[in-house]
Amino acid sequence: MRKPILIANWKMNGSLHANQALLVRMLAKLRPFRKTIDMVICPPFPYLFQVRDLLGYTGLSLGSQNASSAVSGAHTGEVSATMLQEMGCRYVLVGHSERRSLYQESNANVAARHKQVLATDMTPVLCVGETLEEREQGQTMTVIERQLQAVIDASGLEGLSSSIIAYEPVWAIGTGKTATPEQVYEIHRAIREFLDTRQAGTGQSVSVVYGGSVKSGNAAELFQSPEVDGGLIGGASLQADEFALITAALADTVAEAGSLCGMLD
Ligand code: 13P
């Protein structure tokens, strides 16, 4: 059974003061959802320690926005997966589109980072998605399959299926443009079908979340489909009220699905 999950990606935002204020407000609002939804906060590296302490025993998990492809040594500016684990991280984003486009992380490089995370007890959150140009050329699934295959090549299907997959269409990130629920459904299904072509049954075992301009106003419709296991939230995760409303929307869809199952039993 896949548990719904919401991941807050703070990107390069925050300060000691702002993080404290945001989390104090957020944690109070998120308390009612702790049992039904896994919640993860991914702050910038320097704040991992602070956020770990603030999360304490709230049940929320700490995540990192990236991890090095190397184990240790002469890699100035990089942070290894084992260091992140030592800091208390339980999840690590890999292959975020901003890393792929602004910092030239190739599919092979992302797969190498993913492999380092897998070597720990942490869960990699593999981000995949197409640019607007690729979508318009009908290349969406070709691009995503290449991104998924690179991880299979490096770590096997088992490595990929031990991850969470985040579908983040590049054109919807930070643009205010959201994919329609139909587009999200279609791609999440296609990702599961791709996994099933490698080994039947794998598709339904993997959590696939959506990211890209998720807000309180569109969360309910985006999370409605059973193909969507939650969200990877950027801008809206920097506002306690917004993030709490998004969480409530996900909790509502879970409750609705639960009562539908009850009716069918
Ligand atoms: P926004 O929610 O700001 O569009 O960012 C999405 C994202 O990139 C999360 O990783």
Image (cartoon, helix red, strand yellow):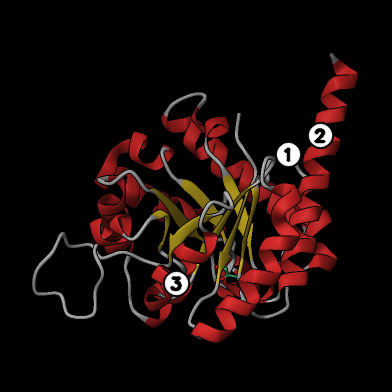
Residue 166: image quadrant is bottom right
Residues at circles 1 and 2 in contact by the CB criterion of under 8 Å: yes
Instruction: Report which residue position mark 1 lands on.
Output: 226
Tag 3: Cα neighbours inside 10 Å, few (<14), some, or many (≥20)?
A: few
With 105 as the anchor, is 14 left or right in this view? right
Outermost residue toward the right?
263
- Whole-percent x and y of residue 55? 53, 60
Q: What is the number of the mark on residue 206?
A: none
- Amino acid type at mark 2: Ala
Instruction: Report which residue position mark 3 lands on.
Output: 50
The residue that appears at 62% across and 38% down in the rendered structure is 3
What is the spatial separation of the Cα atoms under label 1 and label 2, in whole angstroms? 8 Å
Q: Quadrant of ligand 1?
A: bottom right
Q: Specify whether residue 13 is in view.
A: no
Q: What is the number of the mark on residue 257?
A: 2
Q: Secondary structure at mark 3?
A: helix
**The C terminus, quarter of image:** top right
Q: Is residue 259 above or below residue 22?
A: above
- Amino acid type at mark 1: Pro
Q: Earlier in the sequence, mark 1 or mark 2?
A: 1
Q: Earlier in the sequence, mark 3 or mark 1?
A: 3
Name the front one of labels 1 and 2.
2
The residue that appears at 37% across and 66% down in the rendered structure is 66
With 200 as the anchor, is 37 left or right in this view? right
With 88 as the anchor, is 12 left or right in this view? right
**The N terminus, quarter of image:** top right
Q: Choose between 133 and 149: the one closer to the eye.
A: 149
